[in-house]
Amino acid sequence: MSEHNQDKHKARQQKVKEQVDAKIEQAQQEKGILQVITGNGKGKSTSGFGTVARCVGHGMNAAVVQFIKGMWECGERNLLERAGVPFAVMKTGFTWETQNRETDTQAAQATWQQAKQWLQDDSIDLVLLDELTYMVSYDYLDLDEVITALENRPAMQSVIITGRGAHRRLTELADTVSEVRNVKHAFEAGIKAQKGFDF
């Protein structure tokens, strides 16, 4: 790189640094974050679990509520439970397997009761509500009740909600919304889900 190009690069990077520094200076509010991770792509739950691991790695407390996938072996649960993370698991599996609305609703409600307790516990720094969006979409949980619990949680408690088709009211309430887009998926090419990678 020529000296002229190096100077141009340095000037650009200095401008970027100044912009980032200004944003950091402005971001002075301290509060728990509500994040929604939605979209049709793979990796929403995995992202949520990554943040749980980060939280626990800092010596903080996290709790996980798993809707839908409870029948599967879960590598994240195997690891995080050994690290002291409590799990509430809706063990009915996927709704297309049970095909029993009443049973699914009861299971969702029972799991939600534990979630509500954690959403009132200021000793818990982070709550992951994995696949909650489906519970709202299928009317297994009352959206108003979910919103109220989220709004009334401890001020410094962060919450992550994952799942496709997040309701507009959840995304509007959220501080951070990430959408995972499916570009390509191994399953669509007939590749079996791999232990240690997919679950």
Image: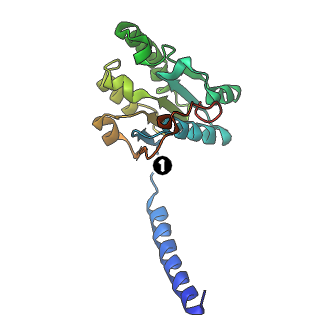
Of 184 and 22, nearer the camera is 184
Q: Position of residue 3 (x, y in %)?
A: 60, 92
Q: Position of residue 131 (x, y in %)?
A: 44, 28
Relative placement, left or right, of 15 versus 193 is left
Q: Is residue 2 above or below residue 10?
A: below
Q: Nearer the viewer, residue 107 or 22?
A: 107
Indicate the amino acid at tag 1. Glu
Disc 1 marks which residue? 30
Residue 158 at least partly seen: no
Compared to residue 193, the image places residue 20 above or below, namely below
Residue 75, by quadrant, is top right
Please report the residue visible at 41 percent of the width from the left and 14 percent of the height from the top. Answer: 109
Taking 30 as reference, is 139 left or right?
left
Secondary-structure class at tag 1? loop
Q: Is residue 134 visible?
A: yes
Up the image or down, 190 lies above or below 86; here it is below
